[in-house]
Image (cartoon, helix red, strand yellow):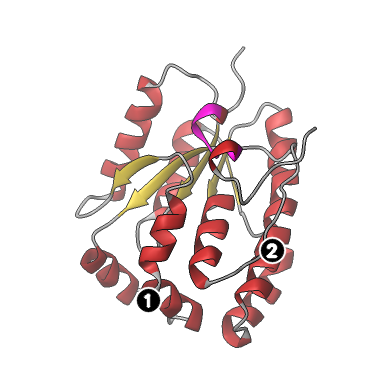
Amino acid sequence: MSEPLFIALEGPRGSGKSTIAPLLADALNADLLPSVPAEYQPLRRYLDEHGRSPDARYALFLSALLTAADQIRERLERGRGVVVESYFARAVATHRGYGSTLHVELPAHVPWPTIYRLECDPAHRARRTAQRAKPDTWWDQLAERNSAAIDQAYTRFPAHRIDTTGRTPAQSLAEILAHKEACTCGHAQPLGLNPHLLPAVPRRAA
């Protein structure tokens, strides 16, 4: 019996993660779990509005993700597939791009997903984000200014690239599902985050 799927959608704002993630979870009969649990949202909002320290924000996201990882592992152990919108790859890449110098060692038991990195032409992304009711935060603006550094940090994470430029969510979803069906590996882990390719975020031995 194959192990349950664990898939993370990564990518910048406006690439389609929040739209495609629930569609993917529904198509796979998987659970869509938040990578930042509800209990952390008030602190996240506070830092989004008032924080300026990349290290402080990174520490909050690492705590949130480790909490989410426990919830994800529990679902996987029950045989449920899991889809998340962003995971450790985005936290690491984004905060490295912001200038954080924190070095962390992730526990060996943290589950690793298959990563699909959604990519989109910058002009198309800008049009999508302009249509949102939520205004840009200081961090959103910093991410746009430091996009090259964030993209470079993302290269440490093996991922399947999906171009969502000019495509409907259904079309992008179909490509992800087609890729998943074509993959013969069955389990997500070998295609996900590889600690050997991310020396600055080592994992402790089990």
Residue for badge 1: 145
Answer above or below: position of 120 versus 173: below
- Expressed as whole percent of the image width and height from the top left, the position of residue 110 reads 70, 40
**Crowding at mark 2 (Cα within 10 Å: few <14, some 14-19, many 20+):** few
The quarter of the displayed image where residue 204 is located? top right
Question: Viewer-proximal residue, 135 or 141?
Answer: 141
Tell me where the magenta segment starts and ends, as one range: 190-195
- From this viewpoint, which residue is outermost toward the left? 166
Question: Is residue 141 left or right of 201 when viewed as pictured?
Answer: left
Residue at x 58%, y 85% (from the top left corner): 49
Residue for badge 2: 38
Question: Viewer-proximal residue, 127 or 87?
Answer: 87
- Expressed as whole percent of the image width and height from the top left, the position of residue 22 reads 47, 48
Answer above or below: position of 8 versus 185: below
| 131 falls in the magenta region | no
Q: Quadrant of the N terminus?
A: top right
Three-letter residue code for mark 1: Arg
Residue at x 60%, y 46% (from the top left corner): 199
Disc number at residue 198?
A: none
Residue at x 40%, y 27% (from the top left corner): 180
Residue 157 shows in the view: yes
Question: Is residue 126 left or right of 9 when viewed as pictured?
Answer: left
Question: Viewer-proximal residue, 83 or 160?
Answer: 160
Task: Describe the element under mark 1 as helix, strand or loop.
Answer: helix
Three-letter residue code for mark 2: Ala
